[in-house]
Image: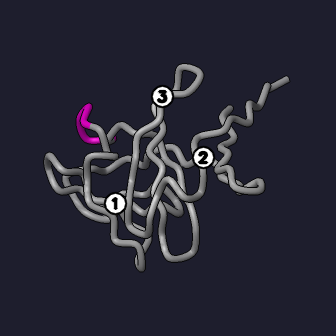
């Protein structure tokens, strides 16, 4: 049986449109971004090399994040890399808003 953890990351007011932040929760590094359609969370480590995605730029309309080190672009919806040098997806985590809180589901 897989245990799923639902954890609070922040308040909805803590992140503006196009902003991104890293959260270290329960042993996981989570990159949370606010796009035009809401909040999205992915694993905070670029699949190309061990660099933090939360230090990158977010395109809130396309819902994409660019790794600051080598320029790989990732979909925040699917985790798939959209440009090289990354070729592997990053994990995507389910996000929900409960009242004024942003929650994430971690496996």
**Mark 3 burial class by Cα count in 10 Å: few <14, some 14-19, many 20+:** few
Q: Is residue 7 above or below residue 41?
A: above
In the picture of the structure, the residue carrying the numbered disc 1 is: 65
Residue 51 position, x and y percent, is: 24, 36
In the picture of the structure, the residue carrying the numbered disc 3 is: 24
Label 2 SS: strand
> Residue placed at 59% from the left, 40% from the top?
9
**Mark 1 burial class by Cα count in 10 Å: few <14, some 14-19, many 20+:** many
Please give the range of residues in magenta: 47-51
Q: Is residue 47 above or below residue 100?
A: above
Q: State which tag comes first along the sequence, 2 or 1.
A: 1
Magenta stretch contains residue 105: no
User: Is 5 left, or right, of 33 in this rendering?
Assistant: right
Taking depth in this image into account, of 15 and 39 the one nearest to the observer is 15
Q: State which tag comes first along the sequence, 1 or 3.
A: 3
Q: Of the residues tagged 1 and 3, which is closer to the observer?
A: 3
Q: State which tag comes first along the sequence, 3 or 2.
A: 3
Looking at the image, the residue that sits furthest to the right is: 1
Magenta stretch contains residue 49: yes
> Residue placed at 53% from the left, 50% from the top?
41
Residue 31 position, x and y percent, is: 44, 44
Label 1 SS: strand
Taken as a whole, is the magenta stretch helix, strand or loop? loop
User: Is 34 left, or right, of 86 in this rendering?
Assistant: right
Label 3 SS: strand
> Residue placed at 46% from the left, 31% from the top?
29
Q: Is residue 101 above or below residue 83?
A: above
Residue 101 position, x and y percent, is: 68, 50
Q: Is residue 81 above or below residue 30?
A: below
């Amino acid at each position: 049986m897989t245990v799923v953890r639902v954890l609070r990351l922040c308040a909805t007011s803590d992140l503006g449109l196009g902003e991104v932040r890293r959260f270290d929760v329960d042993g996981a590094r989570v990159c949370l971004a606010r796009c035009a359609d809401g909040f999205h969370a992915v694993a905070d480590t670029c699949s190309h090399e061990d660099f933090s995605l939360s230090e990158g730029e977010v395109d809130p309309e396309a819902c994409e994040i660019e790794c600051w080190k080598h320029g790989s672009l990732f979909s925040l919806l699917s985790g798939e890399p959209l440009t090289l040098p990354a070729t592997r997806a990053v994990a995507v985590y389910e996000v929900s808003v409960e009242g004024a809180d942003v929650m994430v589901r971690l496996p």
